[in-house]
Image (spheres, rainbow, N blue to C red):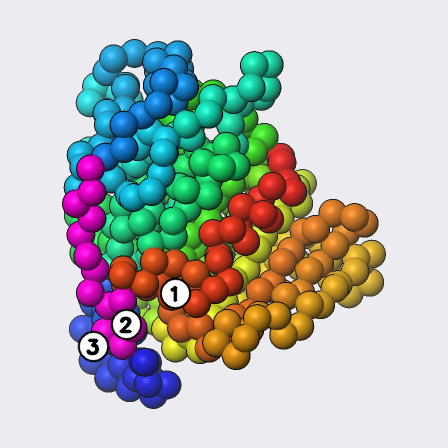
Amino acid sequence: MVRSTLGTRMLRSLLRSGKAQQRSVGKLVTGLLTAAAKSAKAAKSKTAKAKAAKPRSVAAKVVNKAVPSRSAKAKPAPASHAPPSAPGLWLASHYPSRGEPGALGGKRMSYWLYLPREAPAAGSAGMPLLVMLHGCQQTATQFAQGTRMNALADKAGYAVVYPQQLLSSQAQRCWKWYDKATQEGGGDVRMIVGIIDKVAQQYPIDRRRIYICGISAGAAMAYIVALNHPELIAAAGLHSAPAFGAGHNVVGALGVMQHGAGLRVERAIHEVLLREPQFPALPAILIQGMGDQVVRPINQSQLTRQSLMLNRMQVGADYKVTHKAGRGNSHNRQDIHDFYVGRKLILRVAQVARLEHAWSGGDPSLAFNAKAGPDASKMMLDFFGRHRR
């Protein structure tokens, strides 16, 4: 377990050093993340060497019907990149593809796409799409394996896309959620949105049902994408996420993870609403381990305040709150607060007792996944199923 004083000692050491501002955020948080990973039983990742599942005919028809051109076609992922126990189609691609416009500074971002075995019903608006953003020191395929999201998504008929941060952009594959330009919609936000648009053009995707979620830095990035493209995202899921709108440098990023966003909690959302006065409702589910020493629970409290402000559910607004307390045993007891406007669930806040910095109910053979429930992947899909843009 990461000691409660570790982040403080690191922060003080960095502040004494005049060179700290020039370090990457990955170097700052590696000590915290590595300690958390080593302490977990699942710290040693086991590379999956299972054979890639053969696509069934229905999934193949979806691909052949929807791909517009050979140059843009996603290819079946190598067996070493295939998550286990999913019966649909697992594809690997890049954005932009070679010769395709849209590259930012020459960058090409890899992504993996899961298509369910059952095609959308004839006459339907298409499949819902879930965008999954991994955390620091993870790859997209490890995130797919650890969360087991594909197997659940297959049953619910979801397509799932997993963008992967470039090592050339961040040595620990951390999304740069702390960067001010990124928070305002620049940087990797444009690449992620480009991937979403590309997938939605190539396959029968219901554009009213596009959702985004992630863990840690990936959760922070998911929220940033949703805040900058509310017309695109129907709901967001944030697991172990830092509060939005603060940091703005590498030392500040670590400070947010340990102590929250401070004076920026409400100011950052106020700036979003100034840029977009007609900002629509943005439903969100927030899942937080109360034993998390990497991204501390104060961040969830502040994200709750930010979501209430964003959805205009402050004091005096007409909304109600329900509370389900003490579900589960001592290892995975969960408290859930639901915030409703009328009969619509806008915000779900789930707190899991003793959960550290890991995906709840994930595959414990991979780092940053906790065997004990509740199953965060199922919670995400259950919440998303209530919403459409």
Which residue is pictured at 30% across the width and 11% down the height?
Answer: 69
Which percent across, then down, holds residue 306? 60, 61
Number of callouts = 3
Q: Name the one closer to the observer, 314 or 164.
A: 164
Q: Are marks 1 and 2 in contact (CB under 8 Å)?
A: yes
Question: For mark 1, what is the residue?
Answer: 371
Residue type, label 1? Lys
Q: Which residues are magenta?
A: 38-51
Question: Which circle, 3 or 2, is nearer the viewer?
Answer: 2
- Main SS class of the magenta portion in the image: loop
Dot 2 falls on a residue whose secondary structure is loop
Q: Which mark is residue 41?
A: 2
Question: Which circle, 3 or 1, is nearer the viewer?
Answer: 1
Question: For mark 3, what is the residue?
Answer: 18
Q: Name the one closer to the observer, 227 or 122.
A: 122
Dot 3 falls on a residue whose secondary structure is loop
